[in-house]
Image: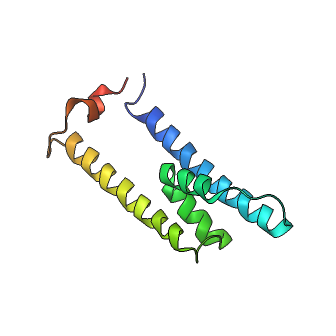
Amino acid sequence: MSVPGLDLLAAYLLLNAGAAAVFYLDKRRARRGQWRISETMLLASACLGPFGALAAMKVFRHKTQKTKFMLVPLFAALHLAIFALVACAGAGWVTLPGALTLAALP
């Protein structure tokens, strides 16, 4: 017996953990004077896992002063809005197009 959406939640948690790991790795490389991870790659990982990226930015004090990394909290807000929309759809409060409903999950 599987819980609907559990695989999706696990994948999402892994994306956030991965984003945090990428930020940590870049910070570690910066301290050691090694070759760095590109800002494009950091932002792409933050787009997929904004909560992990945001936590890593705060904990490791990494990229907090760079203007383009102010996008990371916006990514997190966008993810929260999507979660709220899907939750409201699951409760029957709003109707989403068929491709976006949780019923489409295996």
Q: Nearer the viewer, residue 38 or 17?
A: 38
Q: Where is residue 101 in the image (x, y as percent from the top left)?
A: 26, 34
Residue drawn at (25%, 49%) of the image: 85
Q: Nearer the viewer, residue 31 or 60?
A: 31
Establish if 89 lies above or below 38: above
Establish if 103 lies above or below 61: above
Residue drawn at (40%, 30%) of the image: 3
Q: Is residue 46 left or right of residue 81?
A: right
Q: Position of residue 32 (x, y in %)?
A: 85, 66
Q: Which of 20 and 10 is in front in this view?
A: 20
Figure coloring: rainbow
Q: Which residue lies furthest to the bottom in this view?
A: 65
Q: Is residue 22 left or right of residue 29?
A: left
Q: Where is residue 25 in the image (x, y as percent from the top left)?
A: 73, 57
Q: In this view, does 33 lie to the left or right of 58?
A: right
Dividing the image into 4 quarters, which one contains the C terminus?
A: top left
Which quadrant would residue 55 be assigned to in this image? bottom right
Residue drawn at (56%, 51%) of the image: 45
Dividing the image into 4 quarters, which one contains the N terminus?
A: top left
Residue drawn at (44%, 36%) of the image: 8
Q: Is residue 6 left or right of residue 78?
A: right
Which quadrant would residue 14 be assigned to in this image? top right
Count of numbered badges drawn on the protein: 0
Q: Where is residue 58 in the image (x, y as percent from the top left)?
A: 59, 71
